[in-house]
Image (cartoon, coloured by chain):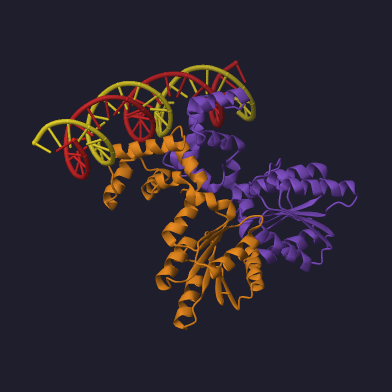
Chain colours: A orange, B purple, C yellow, D red
DNA sequence: TAGCCTGTTACGGCTTTCCGTAAGGTAATA
DNA sequence: TATTACCTTACGGAAAGCCGTAACAGGCTA
């Protein structure tokens, strides 16, 4: 079994249970951080001490409070950690169940397992830990397996996300066009952007821009 | 101390910790439900058995799954419970920290305490339980006290919420006007609705309707 | 090279939103 | 009753979004 595990989770009501669950798996050393920045520093220090972590279990969203943090969410934490310790195993444990989000975690961050916080997630979390210790296969909550096979999600790209974000910030077409030109994103003609928004509206069955943003927000795309 | 307490919480990772915390307060009987419908039935049965619950600790949002449920969220659960047992004490334990939401829980549902799930929420939850057992005062997470005093929230009424919801569903002004006329909501002139939307845009510092809906979604108003 | 396909950009009209102005209605007050 | 204040509704011009058409460029194929 893994020897040294770090849990990055802000809610005390959850971290307590997670740590107890890990203890039942006879893991020797279990550490816990309430902030992403702290988690990153602990992993960094463990490398320097020549006693690195085997596994990182991280939440995705962390509450903002008085503290200033460089890393504000689990995505950023994992990305930063992989840069200094590429071989560390990672499990994401989050309430998030949007296929798009989960998909990108496997594809872009190379996480080893995704466990969705739910009515029976502690046994699932234990299984995931055991499973990725034994094999190197990817592991995902049973009810979320459909996510990786959802073809439709291939069609929504980073370009669309940028577009939707700018729209949701109140930008008009010309402003979006200018922004894309400045950052070198193409296509950036206001007409092409208009067309792309139109495609998104058809895809998401939205009546207008307002409706489109409401749907994108509900889906967790932005 | 309270003798009989019900915890309505879907996430096992949280309910386990909450129950452990209640046990340290020497509460004799602690029950737990993962669904609002189950919680309601348990409370109903306890009344029939002449052994009612003293306290209900409930989450607000519950994940949807295969099961069909009449009560889908904590708000609905508490409202239903108060109808059959008006004197029951209620604590809401939720990640929600939007002032508007919390305010309406105290004012509309008459909850006794609100504890926000956070980095130190288990001690806060224990304090809340002890506090409302001793006194009959309202109790709220320290960092959320500002919520009840936030004057600005008085200005956002049910009318605005209906309006924002229709907007977010892709309705245009004339459709909203027609809907309001059908349901007897006034003002319902398309011009007045336009003005009202304008006020909301100023209030929330939104550039346009799209921006407004994005903000309303972020604030959890809709 | 000519033809075809695809994707980007441009243009024009039509609708909807945006925003200021003004008319009508009601209620409180002098 | 007259005045005032406030709210609702109506109207109109400007701005932005909506949607179809067309021009242009690059890549592929015959």
| Residue that protrudes farthest toward the right in the picture | B50
Q: Residue at x 58, y 38 (%)?
A: B161
Q: Residue at x 40, y 70 (%)?
A: A83
Name the residue nearer the viewer: A149 or A50. A149
Q: Whole-percent x and y of residue A125?
A: 60, 63
Up the image or down, A37 lies above or below B83; here it is: below
Q: Residue at x 30, y 43 (%)?
A: A177
| Residue B151 visible to the viewer | yes
Up the image or down, B209 lies above or below A51; here it is: above
Up the image or down, A20 lies above or below B91; here it is: below
Quadrant of the rendering where the C terminus of chain B is positioned: top right
Residue C14 in which image quadrant: top left
Name the residue nearer the viewer: A175 or B18. B18
Q: Whole-percent x and y of residue A55?
A: 52, 71
Q: Whole-percent x and y of residue B15?
A: 70, 59
Q: Residue at x 62, y 57 (%)?
A: B144
């Amino acid at each position: 079994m893994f020897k040294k595990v770090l849990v990055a989770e802000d809610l005390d009501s959850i971290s307590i249970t997670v740590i107890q669950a890990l203890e039942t798996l006879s893991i020797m050393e279990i550490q816990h951080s309430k902030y992403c920045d702290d988690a990153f520093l602990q992993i960094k220090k463990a490398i320097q001490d020549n006693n690195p972590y085997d596994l990182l279990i991280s939440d995705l969203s962390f509450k903002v409070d008085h503290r200033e943090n460089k890393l504000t969410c689990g995505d950023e934490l994992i990305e930063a950690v992989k840069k200094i310790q590429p071989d560390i195993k990672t499990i994401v444990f989050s309430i998030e169940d949007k296929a798009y989000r989960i998909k990108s975690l496997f594809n872009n961050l190379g996480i080893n397992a995704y466990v969705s916080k739910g009515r029976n997630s502690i046994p699932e979390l234990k299984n995931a830990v055991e499973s990725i210790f034994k094999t190197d296969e990817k592991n995902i909550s049973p009810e979320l397996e459909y996510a990786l096979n959802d073809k439709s999600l291939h069609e929504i790209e980073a370009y669309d996300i940028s577009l939707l974000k700018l729209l949701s910030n109140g930008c008009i077409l010309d402003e979006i066009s200018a922004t894309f030109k400045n950052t070198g994103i193409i296509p950036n003609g206001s007409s092409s952007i208009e067309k792309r928004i139109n495609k998104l509206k058809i895809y998401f069955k939205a009546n207008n821009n307002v409706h489109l943003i409401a749907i994108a927000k509900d889906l967790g795309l932005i």
